[in-house]
Image (cartoon, grey):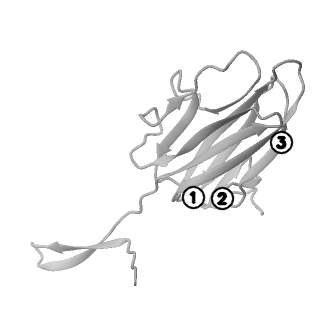
Amino acid sequence: MLLLISFSAMAYDVRKGSVELERVKPVYNWEFNIEGVETGGRWDYVIFGEKPDASDLVDEYDVPKCPPPPMGYVRMILRNNELPYPYTSCWFEYRQSPDVYKVWELNILWVPQSGSDDTEITLSWERTGRTEYKYIMLNDDINMLKEDNYTFTCHAFVPTQFEIVCSRYHIKSIEK
């Protein structure tokens, strides 16, 4: 069985009496599900990605994060201060595709049940769909297209901030 995939389409122009090739733009519809689990088993997750019919502003795909419990939790949010409240802290955030460069801000907060001990949090992620980006970097040093997890020390009551940079082109600090 032979399967051919083409990004061009033929169209017959009645006025010209000829067949012309039209370039069909590829569709990029992708997402990353990022889960954070601390050593005691508490966890949270966020989802970010792109859809052709999404907006870089608020749309039906964006879901604000609900308030946290009183104590004993890991809280992950996608922070975007350019959006109106309550979308400044999202659980799911999708933006329009395609593009050449986008940045998401991921904030993670550890609130222990009691005390003020730090904890180790392991982030793991899975991508679904096809992305146009060559690089999707977590804090400029973890290529999320090549790696699938990252562990760090999270201080109690102090938000840890990460930047997720998506780019079609070489990012200066990437040497890996």
Relative side of 119 to 145, left or right: right
Checking the image for residue 152, the label placed there is 3
Q: How far apart are marks 3 and 1 (CA)?
A: 25 Å
Q: How far apart are marks 1 and 2 (CA)?
A: 9 Å
Type of residue at label 1?
Tyr
Q: Where is residue 84 in the image (x, y as percent from the top left)?
A: 51, 23
Q: Where is residue 171 in the image (x, y as percent from the top left)?
A: 68, 57
Q: Which callout, 1 or 2, points to the residue nearer the camera? A: 2
User: Which residue in the structure is indicated by mark 2?
Assistant: 145
Quadrant, the C terminus: bottom right
Q: Mark 3: which secondary structure?
A: strand
Query: Dots 1 and 2: beta carbons under 8 Å?
Result: yes
- In the orientation shown, which residue stands out farthest toward the top? 70
Q: Mark 2: which secondary structure?
A: loop
Type of residue at label 2?
Leu
Q: Is residue 95 above or below residue 116?
A: below
Query: Dots 3 and 2: beta carbons under 8 Å?
Result: no
Relative side of 28 to 105, left or right: left
Sequence order check, earlier mark of 1 and 2 = 1
Neighbour tally class for label 3: few under 14, some 14-19, many 20 plus, Cα within 10 Å: few
Q: Is residue 83 above or below residue 137?
A: above
Q: Is residue 88 above or below residue 168?
A: above
User: Which residue in the structure is indicated by mark 1?
Assistant: 133
